[in-house]
Image (cartoon, rainbow, N blue to C red):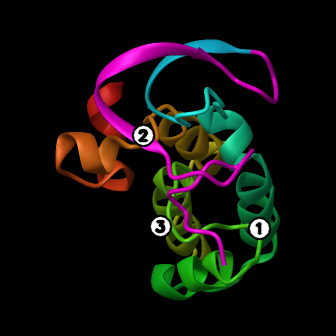
């Protein structure tokens, strides 16, 4: 099995740089600054990297009646489209918590889950390693 630290294009180990560089996503063409890229020049942006996992997340949350956020997290993370590590986890955690709260019957504002996914998706991939705290728990700092 490929390491989660390998390039999604050529499978070479990724560079985790201390200084950001400007790269263009090989999938969507978006140009952005990043600290994580392939030594062969490949780059996949967080949005493209997370696309399948976020769709799985939304589908699971829409059907969930579970009130235990840990169980919701486990259900989402068990899907093969959700990698063990990656920026998608920044959105999975707060969305699962809000879903569990909603499922207890507590009134949750309309659109709160989508807003949590949107906000948490702004936390860049590599946040955890570069800043020393989990990106899933620090999304509110970016608002």
x and y percent of residue 101 in the render? Answer: 50, 70
Q: Quick one: quadrant of the C terminus?
A: top left
**Numbered disc in front, either 3 or 1:** 1
Q: Main secondary structure of the magenta part?
A: loop
Residue 67: name its quadrant: bottom right
Q: What residue is drawn where x is 49% and y is 79%?
A: 69
The label shown at residue 81 is 1
Between 115 and 46, the one lying in front of the other is 46
Residue 104 seen from this side: no
Query: Would you say the residues marked 2 and 1 are in contact, meaning their CB atoms lie under 8 Å apart?
Result: no
Between 86 and 106, the one lying in front of the other is 86
**Secondary element type, mark 1:** loop
Callout 1: few (<14), some (14-19), or many (20+) C-alpha neighbours within 10 Å? some
The label shown at residue 97 is 3
**Numbered disc in front, either 3 or 2:** 2
Q: What residue is drawn where x is 67% and y is 48%?
A: 50
Question: What residue is disc 2 on?
Answer: 15
């Amino acid at each position: 099995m490929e390491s989660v630290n390998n390039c999604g294009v050529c499978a070479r180990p990724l560079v985790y740089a201390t200084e950001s560089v400007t790269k263009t996503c090989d999938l969507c063409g978006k140009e952005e600054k990043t600290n994580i890229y392939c030594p062969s020049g490949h780059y996949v942006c967080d949005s493209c990297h997370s696309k399948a996992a976020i769709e799985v997340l939304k589908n699971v949350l829409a059907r969930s009646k579970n009130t235990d956020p840990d169980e919701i997290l486990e259900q989402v993370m068990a899907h093969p489209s959700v990698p063990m590590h990656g920026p998608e986890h920044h959105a999975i955690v707060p969305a699962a918590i809000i879903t569990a709260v909603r499922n207890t019957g507590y009134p949750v504002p309309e659109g709160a889950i989508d807003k949590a996914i949107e906000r948490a998706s702004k936390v860049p991939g590599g946040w955890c390693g570069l800043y020393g705290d989990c990106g899933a728990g620090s999304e509110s700092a970016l608002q």
